Image (cartoon, grey):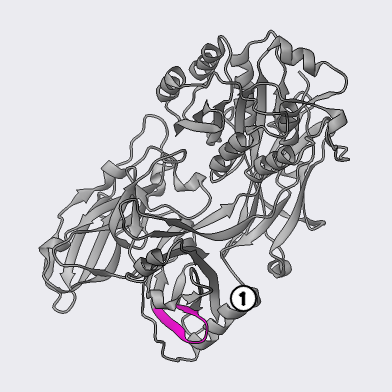
Amino acid sequence: MRTYRRRLYLRPAVWVASVLLVAALSGGGPTMLLAQTPAASGSGGMEATFRAGTQEVLVDAVVVDKNGDPQRDLTRRDFKIFEDGKEQKITSFSIESAEIPGHSSKHFIALVFDSEWPELREDVLQFVDRYAAPDLYMAVFSRVLTNQMRLQQGFTADAGRIKAALRTMQVSTDSPLKGRMPLENPFADRIGGVAEALAPVRGRKAMILFSASFGGLRAELRRPRDAYYRSAPTQDPWLALADDCNAANVSVYSFVSDNPRALSFLQRPDTTDLVRDLAIGTGGKYTPPGDYDLASYLGSVSAEQSDTYLLGYTPSADAADKPCHKLKVKVDRSGLDVNARDSYCTAGQLLARELKPAQRALETRAASGVLGNIAAGMQLSWFYSKPNEAVVDIAMDIDPRAMKMHGRLHGEFNLSGVAYRRGGPAAARVGDTVKLDFRTPAQLEEFLKVPYRYSKQFDIAPGRYLFRMAVGSGDQAFGSVEEPLDIEPWSGQTLSVSGIALGVKDYPLTGLTAELDNSVLEGPRRLASKGREVAPMGGAQFHAGQNGLFYFEVYEPRLAQTTAGETTRPPAMRIRILDRATGQEKHDSGPMDAGAWMRAGNPVIPIALTLPVSDLPAGSYTLEVHVTHDNGEDAVARSADFDVK
């Protein structure tokens, strides 16, 4: 079976601040949610972002021979990496492969049924039975209406649940073709929606697409001149779909039904199959109808996804002068094809000159000590993302009067935050512009009644900082709030604990990535434990009589070193609440162990617990979290202050 590949263009990775406005269905006001959404970068290789505080750029590469078989015997010397045309020194090298003991890594396959034909389900069920593995995560989508693709099962390594979804899913029997091909077909919307859903999963993903053949006459099509295409997508929706899949780092492996009418049409010399072109254009494979073992072939797709080289290099000091950089990975062996991303972009950290004028003005005004007229509360919590690197979660409640109106129903405010080293220069910056649109004056009026909840995350190295966030809109509205930010160094070799996030609400995790860990996801870090996500509050003030929540993470490196059949005793915990004025103990959990929150092989233990505020009178308190090994070694303590009103 021939494998077609081409060079893939990678859209720059950027962080986009977006606002979702949801109207209440029963006459209530709007719900505002500010989220960071990464425009996922990707090619046939792996996506990446270069985060604040990160000293190494990591590049994932898949290497195959001319038959498409993965190559696992390459060394560091076989690779070269070029940034903006200049060769870089490779500082780290590893291979992840299910075929090499101790080197396996998670890989992801989405089974997408845009069409169905006889015995297809049974073949796919055989694939699941034969190739399911702890590191293979599968998801199932199926077309239920002409223009609707439904998630039947989110990513899971549980073969039983995948098989249950395959057996019970509905696949529309309506023709996937609608209107005159290819101009009026919603296929691109359906498949593009799946690619968008896959984008937050880090690394290369495979979309196994079962579909009808989509043909078009060349006489009607504008074909781009691209030597890397064997048969190029030719209408704008198809070009956009290939770009969207590449941007989401999704390779399409397409399988089509053997409908005689469609095949006879595609055999005409003036016809191109656009589904084939989509597979080729995303670095995947196209498999025409034929007599072969589908389950075994799908197993080969899984094997290709599981073999990855991870290369690292340290960018030059002047690399920060540009937001995005071109990458090129080469292999010094003939007859091999390397599939890797071709650029990276900075994310999170900003240089002062990259701030918008309004954001720079806010920073200058806040640094001058000018008193503001807008109130804002802020909570900072932090979590290790890897040794000696942390992600900081900012949660704020902002007086809605900070919003400047542009017209009757469009509002906007700017934010500018700086983390200063104690007695030193700025170590990290965040800048943002929040834009809000309202459908009616009543919606706007309801919005102005309560503080606006804002959240953002950025990366930083451990240290002692003062973080100041300024918020305003125009010359009149201005506010500033600052909090200490102390993050202890951590080598990754010892027991440790994150900061503490306080909240009053949590939400069930649902959807495609509900069961996935933060380590395999791009975008904002989820503060999630046992299937529920804690929403940090914009401050540290609780209402008397109402319980709160708190979230923290325990880092136990021994869990990642445990081999099959071995067990690691869980760390011991103790939770206390003290009166901040007198030091009197108000609550003591007594000895607890973290075993109920541990996950096999995962060194991060995410813990969410109820904060018994309802038992406390109004006052000021300190929450203390103590964690040790079960023998009392490596004691770590964290604390968070809060008030009860």
On the rendered structure, is 435 left or right of 62?
A: left
119, above or below 222, in the image: above
Residue 308 location, quadrant: top right
Amino acid tagged 1:
Lys
Q: Residue furthest top?
A: 291
x then y, percent, for residue 160: 40, 21
Q: Quadrant of the N terminus?
A: top right
Specify whether residue 414 is painted magenta: no
x then y, percent, for residue 486: 40, 72
Specify whether residue 476 is painted magenta: yes
Q: Magenta stretch: give its range.
A: 467-482
Any part of residue 55 in sight: no
Identify the residue position indicated by label 1 in the image.
356
Magenta segment, prevailing SS (helix, strand or loop)? strand
Q: Nearer the viewer, residue 233 or 164?
A: 233
Q: Nearer the viewer, residue 564 or 308?
A: 308
On the rendered structure, is 215 left or right of 464?
A: right
On the rendered structure, is 560 left or right of 308?
A: left
Residue appearing at x 56%, y 35% in the figure: 103
Any part of residue 448 in sight: yes
